[in-house]
Structure formats: structure tokens, C-alpha cells
Amino acid sequence: MKKTQIKKPLNTINLAEEVNKGFSKIDQLDARLERYSTAKHRALENLQTLDETVPLSVEHGIAITKAVERLKGCGNYLTFHHYYTVGAVKLAKARFCMQTLLCPFCAMRRASRTLEAYLTRYRILKAVNPTWRLSMITLTVKNGNDLAERFKHLQDSVQRVFKHRRKALNEGKSVTEWRKVHGYVGTYEFTYKGKGWHPHAHIMVLHTYTFDYKAMQAEWKEITGDSHVLNVTAAMNPTEPEKDFMEVFKYSVKFSDLLPEDNIHAWGVLKGKRLLFSGGAFRGVEIPESLTDELLEDLPYIELIYRYTVYGYSLESSLIKESSKT
């Protein structure tokens, strides 16, 4: 089967735009629809690849058939509420397939809601603990052709890191730089560029004291047995922390960089796996189940319904409503 040549349809700044870069303003609606249109187009590329895969797959045949049906209806219609008295626009209704490893539209919406939830917790923690610092730590393991094996190796290694942290904090029985971490939230990410699958974890950490990089590097090599590669980067955007956090929460969208057939393979291996983890001060953050926006109560609005076509989203109908309760 000939591989589909694609461009990157999404980039990390989309997530910041989804959270607090004016996406809720009416003059940003066209740009928002363009992002969703690009994401929907890529979802349809995955849909086509899945359709071609069904006759070839026995083990995943039923799962693929279900995934195809869910993808077909995802994002076909979007309903927005334009609150014209305040110039705001909110995504009120949409059909979501919730397959964030296959559908960039759902991935974008889920990532933005996740980012928003952790940003809220971060701002609260920072207000109470102004001396806490924010950094990103990236952990990697050696590339490999077996994605399932590489994921398990990375996941097991990361879990050992935080097991050492717990022992150091609770029992004083482990010597680790990770004891300096007050709270953490991270995601697993996988890329494929012709030299095997490249698994890594991006982790945002809150800390007070500076890390000993060489000690962290030596500990990671001892844990993994095959990698000493890690990176520690101080947050670069103190007034706009979403720019730092979104590197972590774009993990779902990252699959859009893959060719569709590689994307399908990654989905088959990783579906149902937990790709987000947190602990310490970031434990217990609740991520909304709904992928729509929070609506404004008791304000009149214009209901805007958009339908996806081969040319993108086009306005299907509009209707004035007295308030969001009518």
C-alpha cells in the first residue's frame, strides 16, 4: 500500500490558542474553524487507512470496525453559541469519537481541556508557594522497532523513578534527585522517523532546589540500562505558563506527525493505555469529561451550526436565541 504523504496539520501553539489566546472571541472563530477543519481532514485520512486495514486484520478487526464507525460521524457538525452582547463564542455541541490517538480533532479538544485543568492547579499552587519553580524534564529510552516493548520499558522505568521518590520522601531509604520534586505531571510520547520508535516522557515538575543533572543522568542510566539521555529545562514563560505546559499535553496531537499507517499501528498498540500520569501537588486534578466549552448563562446568543465539507467548515444555519436556557 502506498504511503500517504502528509504535512503536519497541527502544531503546539494550537493548544495555547484553545485555552487562552482569544479562541472564545468571535473574531477568532474563523481561525478556530480552520484548525478544526485541518484536524478533521487528517482524521479522514486515518479513516481511509482503517477502511483499507479491516480486511487484512483478524486480531483487531472488530476494534477497527468500531473505530471506523465512530470516526465517520466525528465533528461533521459543530454548534457554536455566539453571545453577541459580549462578543464571545463557545462550542456548545459536537459529536466526538473520543479516539484521541486516531482523531486530531478530539485530541486537540482533550489536550486543551487537560491543559486548562492543570494550569488552574498550577496557578493556585504558585500563588501559595511563590518560591516554587517550574521545569520540564524529558526522559528517553533507546529507539526500537517493537513499540509495545519500548512503551513498557519506558513506563516501567518512569514508575521506578517515582517509586524511588516516594521512598526518599516517606521512608528516607532512597537517594534520588527526584525527592526535590513537589509535584509532577507528565505524558508519554512516541515518534517514528525511520530509525525505530522513539519513546520519551515529558514531565512538568515543581521544585525549589536546583537539580544535580549528572546525578539524575546516572540514576536514569541505572534504571533503564540503555539510556542516559534526559533533559532538564527551566520554564521559559513565567507570564504565559501554557506555552511550557503545552509541550507536555500535546502528546495526543503528536500522532498527527505520523504517516496514517504508522498512526494506525500506534493506535492499535497504545489504545486503552494510560499516557498521562501525575503525583505530588498535581495529584487529583480533575479533567472535564465533556469536550465542549463552558457556556455562558442567561445571555442571548446566536446559534451557529457549521457542517464539514471537502472545503472545510461552512455555515449551515443560524438562529437567534433569547438566552442559553431557552
Image: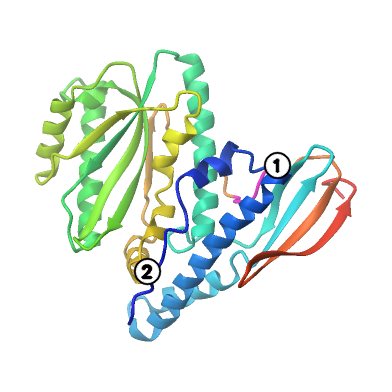
Q: Residue at x 34, y 60 (%)?
A: 270
Residue at the spot 20% in from the left edge and 59% down from the top edge: 149
Residue situated in front as seen by the camera: 158 or 167: 158
User: What residue is pinned by disc 2?
Assistant: 264
Locate residue 309: give its quadrant: bottom right
Q: Is residue 67 visible?
A: no
Above or below for 303 versus 171:
below
Callout 2 amino acid: Ile
In percent of width and height, residue 35 lies at 56, 55
Circle 2: element type: helix
Q: Which residues are magenta?
A: 290-294
User: Magenta stretch: residue 256 in it?
Assistant: no
Q: Residues within 10 Å of mark 2 (few under 14, many from 20)?
A: many
Q: Is residue 152 left or right of residue 186?
A: left
Q: Which residue is mark 1?
A: 25
72 w.r.t. 96: above or below: below
Among all residues in the image, which is located at the extreme bottom? 55
Q: Earlier in the sequence, mark 1 or mark 2?
A: 1
Q: Main secondary structure of the magenta part?
A: loop
* Amino acid type, mark 1: Lys
- 167 relative to 222, above or below: above
Query: Which of pointers 1 and 2 indicates the residue nearer the eye?
Result: 1
The location of residue 209, given as percent across then percent down, is 28, 16
The coloring applied to the image is rainbow
Identify the residue at horizontal 26%, vertical 31% (top origin). Answer: 232
- Give me the C-alpha separation between circle 1 and circle 2: 35 Å
Q: Residues within 10 Å of mark 1 (few under 14, many from 20)?
A: some
Residue 298 is tagged as none
Between residue 18 and residue 266, name the one nearer to us: 18
Picture quarter with the N terminus: bottom left
Question: Is-magenta flag for residue 293?
Answer: yes
Q: Does residue 222 lie above or below 57 as drawn?
A: above
